[in-house]
Amino acid sequence: MIKAGIVGGTGYTGVELVRILSAHPQVELQWLTSRSEAGTPVADIFPSLRGVTNLVYQDFGDDNLKMMSACDVVFFATPHGVAMKQAEDLVKAGVKVIDLAADFRLQSLQEFETWYNHSHACPDLLKSAVYGLPEVNRKRIANAQVIGNPGCYPTTAILGMKPIIDNQNQTGTALIDKRIVIDAKSGVSGAGRQASLALNYAETTDNFKAYGVAGHRHLPEIEQGLSLILNSQFDHKIRFVPHLVPMIRGMLSTIHLELTEQGKQVDWQQAYEEAYQNEVFVDVLPSGSVPDTRSVRASNKMRIAIVQNNERAELTILVVQDNLVKGAAGQAVQNMNSLFALPETVGLEIVPVVP
Ligand SMILES: NC(=O)c1ccc[n+]([C@@H]2O[C@H](COP(=O)([O-])OP(=O)(O)OC[C@H]3O[C@@H](n4cnc5c(N)ncnc54)[C@H](OP(=O)(O)O)[C@@H]3O)[C@@H](O)[C@H]2O)c1
């Protein structure tokens, strides 16, 4: 059995990890932390977990290394800046680290420090950390010590663009115009389980707004995704605007592209179907379909639809996922499965919840 621990077990991604890991046949969840709820049984905070786990929240402080080192893998479902302070000691102790925050996502130290306004505690380890997007990076993930689990929006953007970038790289031809517009919407759980005026029921319900319009931290991660992770040989200019929608979970990213004359020659529906035919967690919908967030709720599935209009030279890619599952905890478990040589699907064959 894989011995696992979770730092940050009261947050939305933390509790989602508990839900998924408790049903995982190869995992024994040993402990989880919360500074604010130390000593409280998990099921007292989340009645959904009554009868699922008897664990009690542990405090998180300097003396946790012994507890953490007894694990095979530690998940950090915390804000950025937490995992980086523990990761070196954990790696020395032979423990695998999966950070759901941004400490190990951006390979450029300068980009990290600029966007997160935080100096990096272990730049050397950052160099060997692997970006945990299995559909792109699974060979490297299998041998990693530290995984930077991708951001939710970048997961939709990178997998939403992958067949196009791969196709351009293979043909050496620009198939889309440089300018890429990503118009993305997230449910409110994307902001975490925090008390804040902007996230009050009366502020978020029956309301719809953009945020991070002038620049969002996921932009450099999406740019890195296209340039380094997908190795694009072409220069793209990305305009990314996220929005908050009045739903609890779910994410829809609409990617607007302009096709070049060569790009119009490609049947993109077929190209996407072929690209993802062996990917269990990426479902390319039949032509003419439009994906909705409900069709992936609580599951690790991403669904993609393609709308090609050659007369207008338009290609529109619609991508949905559950921000807390494929966008966070589910993807983290998919990565864990690879780290321990298990099939990626173990513990993740969850049917979406409808209605
Ligand atoms: N929500 C999403 O849809 C989503 C998607 C992808 C990635 N992420 C990323 O995943 C991470 C967790 O997100 P979340 O939405 O689950 O956040 P959250 O709901 O705000 O939960 C944060 C958790 O971390 C703990 N924590 C906070 N500061 C800490 C510190 N300094 N040291 C140790 N523990 C600390 C909190 O508990 P205590 O304060 O009681 O210790 C809490 O359990 C974030 O980095 C987020 O950007 C989130």
Image (cartoon, rainbow, N blue to C red):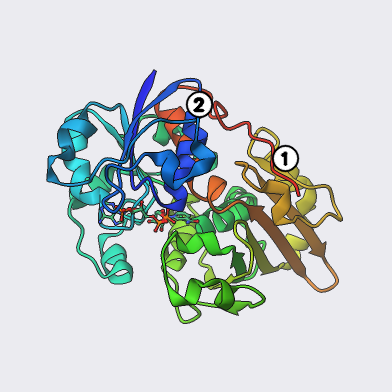
Dot 2 corresponds to which residue?
A: 24
Q: Residue at x 37, y 53 (%)?
A: 101
Residue 349: image quadrant is top right
Q: How many C-alpha atoms fall within 10 Å of the one at disc 2: few (<14), some, or many (≥20)?
A: some
Q: Nearer the viewer, residue 179 or 235?
A: 179
Q: Is residue 107 visible?
A: yes
Residue 54: image quadrant is top left
Amino acid found under the numbered disc labelled 1: Glu
Q: Earlier in the sequence, mark 1 or mark 2?
A: 2
Residue 318: image quadrant is bottom right
Q: Nearer the viewer, residue 229 or 53?
A: 53
* Residue 305 percent coordinates (x, y): 75, 54
Please tell me whether mark 2 sits on a helix, a strand or a loop: loop
Q: How many C-alpha atoms fall within 10 Å of the one at disc 1: few (<14), some, or many (≥20)?
A: few
Q: Quadrant of ligand 1?
A: bottom left
Tell which tag, 1 or 2, sits nearer the viewer: 2
Q: Nearer the viewer, residue 327 or 316?
A: 327
* Residue 229 percent coordinates (x, y): 45, 50
In the shown orientation, is residue 103 left or right of residue 271? Answer: left
Please tell me whether mark 1 sits on a helix, a strand or a loop: helix
Q: Are marks 1 and 2 in contact (CB under 8 Å)?
A: no
Q: Residue at x 46, y 20 (%)?
A: 26
Picture quarter with the N terminus: top left
Amino acid found under the numbered disc labelled 2: His
Residue furthest to the bottom in view is 214
In the shown orientation, is residue 191 left or right of residue 353? Answer: left
Q: What mark, if any, has residue 274 been given in the picture? A: 1
Q: Residue at x 78, y 70 (%)?
A: 313
